[in-house]
Amino acid sequence: MVKENPCDLVGSIHVPESLPEFFTEEEFGKLLEGAKTYPRNTERNAALLEFIYASGCRREEVSNMDADLISYGKDPFATVKQGKGKRDRLVLLGDRFSRAWEAYLKVRSRALSKWERPLEKAAFVTHDGRRMSPAAIYDVIRQLCRHAGVKVLYPHAIRHSAATHMLNNGDNLENIREQLGHRSLSTTQVYLHVALERRREQYRKSHPAASSSPPATS
């Protein structure tokens, strides 16, 4: 009905790029400690946190993970199945996850036996022996944050945390890209900005020349 678009001369709105939210190493350590005193599903929650942090998996990938795709013990790893048309990937895990997983397997076995679900393949199950949905994983992580007294974030923030901590501790972008399953290295490069912002924050706190105050004189 209108021959001319009145918005043709209106420029696009510039939205500032936001950096991913993440836990510091100290905050994540506090989250892990809090999980040990959470009143329900203690072993599962500890293994869940350790798996997301060690692997950097998305919550949908965690939900879809089957127990037989996890190899634990020496040099633990898991195979992330991406479905038809997508490339599966191998994610490395750590010794700390391996210990948490081994403790959880005993509890998982008892739960599946109790609910008569011995053939359940899911790595992480609910209290009644069913596969944890992405929504359930989201809710559990937020409950654990509140219990531990850390900022209330979400499973993807643990993925961001893993990548940021790997970068801060000397890993390279290509290794991080493969672990997270990014198709393009440019997607992984956002963590350079996160690490740089963290470095700036520490610099402002620690370097005398970073402050606008004049140097102290004797």
Image (cartoon, rainbow, N blue to C red):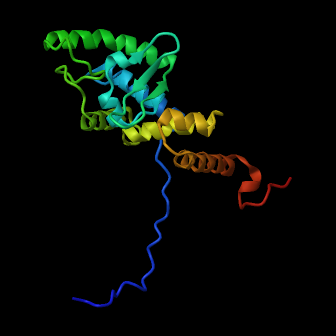
Q: Residue furthest left?
A: 116
Residue 167 lies, in percent from the top left, at 60, 37
Residue 73 pos. (x, y %): 47, 10
Q: Residue pushed farthest front?
A: 85
Q: Nearer the viewer, residue 145 or 60?
A: 60
Q: Is residue 25 left or right of residue 80?
A: right
Q: Is residue 32 in view? A: yes
Pick the front one: 68 or 41: 68
Residue at 44%, 36% in the rendered image = 158
- Identity of the residue drawn at 32% across and 12% down: 105
Work out whether residue 33 can be spotted.
Answer: no
Residue 90 pos. (x, y %): 47, 26
Residue lying farthest bottom? 3
Q: Quadrant of residue 87?
A: top left
13 w.r.t. 191: above or below:
below
Would residue 205 appear left or right of 83 to someone viewing this image? right
Count the marks. Answer: 0
Pick the front one: 54 or 5:
5
Is residue 4 shown above or below 29? Answer: below
Quarter holding the N terminus is: bottom left
Residue shown at 49%/60% (left/top)? Answer: 17
* Percent of width and height locating residue 82: 36, 33
Write the residue at 80% across / 56% down: 215
Left or right: residue 57 versus residue 117 is right
Tell me if residue 72 comes above or below residue 145 in the rendering: above
Asked where in the image residue 53 lies, by quadrant, the reply is top left
